[in-house]
Image (cartoon, helix red, strand yellow):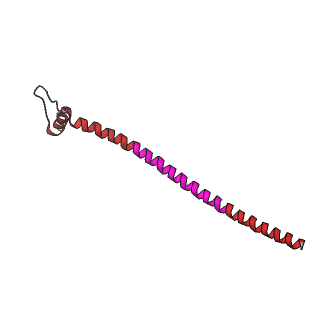
Amino acid sequence: MAKSKRKKRKAELRIIAVLVLCICSVVGYRRVQLEAEYNKKLEKKQELEFSILDEQERSKDLDQKKAYVQTKRFIEDVARQYLGLVYPDEVLLQPEKKTD
């Protein structure tokens, strides 16, 4: 009878060992999955932070342009560029056209 109890006890320990091994392998596998997911999300977070910084810079540039557009200097620059504005005391020099 002592041998049958020992065999039964060994069988129970083997079953417990197999179950513990299965649980450890599942936990390990899930840990690897979670680490991969965490790394992807961390990369996405960094990309979004860079995007936020870029948009903040763009916003500053737009604010500066908005301030410039409301100045007299901007109006003069546009008039010179598109309408050919010339002040009365200015002289425009244009290159001569070559004739062959």
Picture coordinates of residue 97 (x, y %)? 17, 36
Picture coordinates of residue 27 (x, y %)? 64, 60
Residue found 89% across the figure and 71% down from its top: 2
Residue that protrudes farthest toward the right in the picture = 2
Decide: is 40 above or below 85.
Answer: below
Residue found 16% across the figure and 37% down from its top: 79
Residue found 58% across the figure and 58% down from its top: 33
Q: Nearer the viewer, residue 34 or 74?
A: 34
* Horizontal side, residue 17 vs residue 93: left or right: right
Please tell me in which quadrant of the rendered image residue 98 appears.
top left
Residue found 44% across the figure and 45% down from its top: 49
Decide: is 52 above or below 2.
Answer: above
Residue 41 lies within the magenta run: yes
Residue 26 lies within the magenta run: yes
Residue that protrudes farthest toward the top in the picture = 89
Residue that protrudes farthest toward the front in the picture = 1
Q: Which of 49 and 21 is in front in this view?
A: 21
Which secondary structure type mostly characterizes the magenta part of the structure? helix
* Horizontal side, residue 78 vs residue 56: left or right: left
Picture coordinates of residue 12 (x, y %)? 78, 69
* Horizontal side, residue 76 vs residue 6: left or right: left
Please tell me in which quadrant of the rendered image residue 59 appears.
top left
Residue that protrudes farthest toward the left in the picture = 88
The range drawn in magenta is 25-52
Q: Nearer the viewer, residue 91 or 29?
A: 29
